[in-house]
Image (cartoon, rainbow, N blue to C red):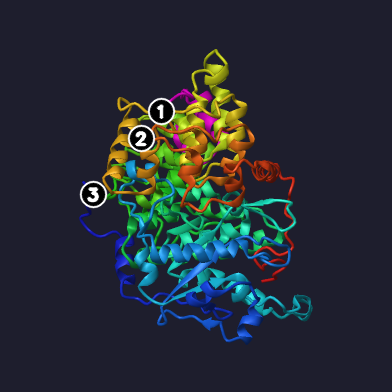
Amino acid sequence: MWCHVRPTPLEEYSKSLHNSAGHTEPMLFPMYTVPAKAILSMTTLEPHEALKLQGLLVEFDKTMGKALFVSHQWVGRRHPDPDFIQFSVLQEALRHLMSEVQYIDSWMALYDFVALPSVKPFATAELKSAPLFVWYDYFSCPQLEHLVSHVESGLMSDLAKAVSSIPLYVAECSFFFALCPVIESKDHSKLLGPQSWASRGWCRIERCCRELSPQGSWVMIRSAKQMELISSPVATLGFGSPGEGLFTVEEDRQRLGPVVLTTLQRKLRFLLQSGDLVGYRVLLNHQPLFLRGFHVPAMYDFVPGFEADPFKDGALTVSKFLYNNGFSKVTEVDKVGWTPLHYAGCRGDPDLVRALLAQRANPNVKAAKDNVMAGARSKWRVMTSVAACRHHEVARILIEAKAELSGTQLVGACIGNDPEGVRLLCEVGGVSPHAADYEGGYGVPAIHLACMYGATAALEELVAQAATHSSGSGMRQGSIDVSHALWLAPCFGNCSAELVNTLLDLRADVNEQFHLSVRNPVGLLVKVMALKHRFGKQTHFSRISFHANGATPLMQAVMGGQYEAAAALIARGARLDLRNSHGYTVADLAMGRSPPAFLVQAFEGQLAGCLRVASLAVGSTNGENGETEENENAMIEVHF
């Protein structure tokens, strides 16, 4: 049972912070926003200086209403949206949210429904509960100043001040939208969309700041009527660490490390002030994940007063860890059933894990409840977090310590898109590449979950491992049904053209129509959700479930808003005339969803746009387009 005879130093420290005022850092440049009403009436995008002269910019503070931070990529080299294509999607999305939609569902609706039911949809009423103001880099940050003169004089420019204040702007905002419609750059040299947005270092920084803000969740806009809530922290693993993103100016990568560390510390203090000790432990020990790619060490000594016991020098590492995590002993569990070893596994420190195991920490304890902050289900073992966080040395230590392994741990490596982790679990740990997640995962095979998470590298390693475990070739690739994987992949939030091409190269059937059996747990769940949809309880998940039987991968992609994947499927021969069991074609299913122009043209028989988009997507994946932006979110050549 989770209890203490006396409060731990962590609990006492947390209580001491309950009534203390949070540390407010000053913004170096005012937070300029534009009222939503003015946003909706714009027909062109003008820079900060022009809107300031027109009196449209407002210095925001929370007494005025609520603010929305818009993260996006620049379409042109010197202008964020020369043809007003991307911004018009934002306008239509805001109109849609404020008039027609009550809730935005999660990007991983099936995962959250099955594994983390406590994750709730976003109620759009919040957008209308107070006056809304929008932060957007081009008009919120100075654009026309001559930066070189500031650098030479040793002064920080206003642009640099604004950029350095971005974490504070994000924290001040009630909402965060990632504006990611699939469009071509102005010079038609590259494709912009969810995949490219998620790869950019600055976009990752903005996303990370949001995830570490008190609100945490955010919305991805794929089209004017296709939006998804990103609320599960497990999404962080799929979208990647900020320091591993692409930066046009390489020096920015290391300049931003301290910014992320400061943001982490701010969130840790917030969690302690609010008494969320589980969330505090999760974030404290996930710091290496957020800081990966930066040369900045994590800081773990948050609780004052630790004194080393001179008679326990050999246990100093463990004692200090327990003290800062609020545990009294190695075998203790907190209120979600996580042990010290669970949290040490997230940290990935081999010496710490060895020291805990030496004091008889059990690597096979299963969590009693969901740990939402970690994106972890009940029954979660230490090794699952280790695999998801790509801590390979710690994984080897746990394997040597006889940690029990199953398909669930293999799923962890897929969540982290980690081929080395897959190889380690299969070759050293003896896990079958055909294994499924039976610990709360409805028995879904690891390869299918890899596709759901868009984990192409993990998928390729699973297929390679399967080839060594069984004979056979062709469609099933050694008993792996790649056609079913292709059908599942576009149902969720991260299906790329690369993943589609990988599965098709493995000889998946681009036009196979699936019929789920109610004898299968997932099929039964889909049937139940389809009935709910029929009788009026409609969500993103229920709509996909209702149309699932007889649907093709292309239909799944369009319903899931996976437009890059849809273009790739059409380019590889997906038929547009097939109908699902309810008689709907892919064009019917796209109706009312505001798909991009290249798909609308394809429905009318003109495939050139999809062929071009599919080609650009492959070029982006292979790095052919490189980092050609001269102005990446108005932040190039900013010196802090």
| Disc 2/disc 1 C-alpha distance (Å) | 8 Å
Chain part drawn in magenta: 410-435
The reply to whether discs 3 and 1 touch (Cβ–Cβ < 8 Å) is no
Closer to the camera in the image, 522 or 593: 593
Q: Which mark is residue 255?
A: none
The reply to whether discs 2 and 3 touch (Cβ–Cβ < 8 Å) is no
Q: What amino acid does circle 1 point to?
A: Ala
Name the residue that disc number 2 marks: 441
Note whether 527 is above or below 73 in the view shown: above
Q: Is residue 445 visible?
A: yes
Q: What amino acid does circle 2 point to?
A: Gly
Q: Earlier in the sequence, mark 2 or mark 3?
A: 3
Residue 280 relative to residue 560: left or right: left
Residue 2 relative to residue 616: left or right: left
Q: Secondary structure at mark 3?
A: loop
Residue 264, position in %: x, y? Answer: 48, 62
Residue 39, position in %: x, y? Answer: 53, 73
The reply to whether discs 2 and 1 touch (Cβ–Cβ < 8 Å) is yes
How many neighbours does mark 2 have within 10 angstroms: few (below 14), some (14-19), or many (20 or more)? some
Whether the magenta-drawn stretch holds residue 432 is answered as yes
Q: Earlier in the sequence, mark 2 or mark 1?
A: 1
Residue at point 51%, 46% (across, down): 238
Q: What amino acid does circle 3 point to?
A: Trp
Whether the magenta-drawn stretch holds residue 511 is answered as no
| Disc 3/disc 1 C-alpha distance (Å) | 31 Å
The secondary structure that dominates the magenta segment is helix
| Disc 2/disc 3 C-alpha distance (Å) | 26 Å
Q: Which mark is residue 2?
A: 3
Residue at point 52%, 50% (across, down): 289
Name the residue that disc number 1 marks: 436
Closer to the camera in the image, 603 or 100: 603
Residue 128, position in %: x, y? Answer: 37, 71
